Amino acid sequence: MESKKKQKVNDIKCRDIIENEINISSTNTKQEYNDVDDGDDNATCMQNKVIERVNNDCLAQIFTHIPPFERPKVAQVCKKWKEALPYSWSNNVQKLEYLYWKYDRDETEQTNKKSRCLKRLINQCGRYLTELDIIGYGNSNIMPLIKKTCPQIVSLRLRFANVKNVHFKNAFSNMSSLQSLKIIFQCNSSIPTELINSLIDVADTLNHLAFFNWRITRRNEEIPNIFTSVLSQLNALEYFDLFGYLNDVNRPLFYAAPMNADVFHQDDLIPLRYEGRFGEAEYINDTDNDGVTDDFLINVANNFRKLETLKIWGFQVTDIGIIALTHKKSLRQLRIRFEDDSFNYYITDSSVQFFKNMTYLDVRMCSVTNYSIIKVIENSPELKILRVAFTKVTHELVKKAAELTRNRKNGIILSMMISLANIDGIFDTPEYKSPFLEIECVVSTRDLLDDDE
């Protein structure tokens, strides 16, 4: 029977995971400490003895609680930890993520450190990965390594600020399971021809392909003609997304896509697309009832430095897209709309809590609670309109909102829309009132449809 006893090793609790492995109980440890003299040297010696008696499987289990980018650093503790590190990758590392935000300069130092160790990390755990999202690394010289070490990749997202055609020769020939490929080009050159040709190797598995252009110039706004013939051969393709490529020039390739593929040109939703003003829009209103995607929000967050107001249909949006928007320091108004009775379970506190300095936030019919909404109120002293009807908020939110706005120095009144009943006139009691808080109660989702000022 597998032992369930907990051990203490350098103040880290672990559990033996293989039958009949060495157990280190607190009683045994105490006895060994009684056999040595007091003092730092003896204590260190005792700790080393304990570590030496812990098997690699147990140490590897400890590593699984440490983020992948931190593991090599922790492994420097001693020789035993270095030996155990390779065993940790096979336990739970199937996804490696290294993100990037174009206008977020606060992460520069951390980003540089991660870039330096990324290749070593992929070398160590690449064969176990099924998902690789490394848009934080902007050089195409990473492609040969991915090709060599990541044969099980299903989903791949990349960004290139520096591109060399040679790096993409047969780039996907070793990725027989690749289903999703999203590439961000943040460079002056067009899509490499070797990359386009290499797509043939995943023609029978690739169902989602996306090319996003984050630096539009006359040299890269047009997709090479060779792509038309390759696109027609992608038999498994279901979705093809474009962003930042001239619509009129590239429209003929839409007709080359497989019959069942859904082609989405994200630029159709954006004003001032070209004429040298791409990325200058301060207001974007999604009028397409099909809604936007997380990819669209990520593209917007990284390319519209002046964006202040965003109105979207949120059927397809999740925390992934909302998190991208929280990095937009210029964003002041976010309005997420839904049709009647269309509740979104994938926009949660995990993302909404990070919004700051908002003046208008509409997250109606999303899976948010008091926690994230209180955070928004605390961090948005000029918040005027807050719509949280048909969410998971409770009466306690109104009480807390009254407390937070009661002493507002700027005199701004917060208008909050909720779908909570005013039971026994609770909202009229002193605890729930503030001179700078107005409460609007709605009883039906139909009351929201025409409220789109």
Image (cartoon, rainbow, N blue to C red):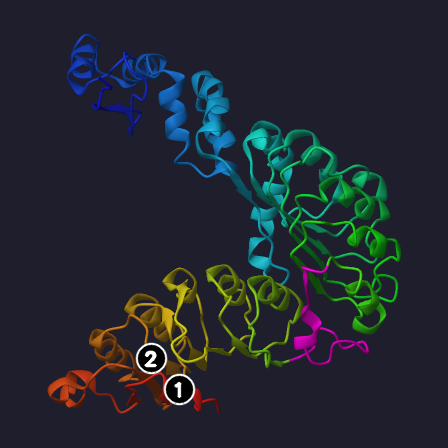
x and y, in percent, of residue 289 in the image: 55, 78
- Is residue 424 magenta-colored? no
Look at the picture and state if 36 lies above or below 272: above
Horizontal side of residue 204 vs 405, given as left or right: right
- Residue 448 bears which disc, if any? 1
Whether residue 189 is visible here, answered yes or no, is no
Q: Which residue is mark 2?
A: 389
Whether residue 391 is visible here, answered yes or no, is yes
Q: Main secondary structure of the magenta part?
A: loop
Horizontal side of residue 35 vs 201, given as left or right: left
Rendered-image quadrant of the N terminus? top left
Horizontal side of residue 345 vs 233, given as left or right: left
Q: Are marks 1 and 2 in contact (CB under 8 Å)?
A: yes
Q: Across the whole image, how many numbered discs are drawn on residues?
A: 2
Q: Residue furthest left?
A: 424
The quadrant in which residue 354 appears is bottom left
Instruction: Please state the extent of the stretch shown in magenta in the rendering.
Output: 259-281
**Residue at point 88%, 62% (across, down):** 219
The quadrant in which residue 449 appears is bottom left
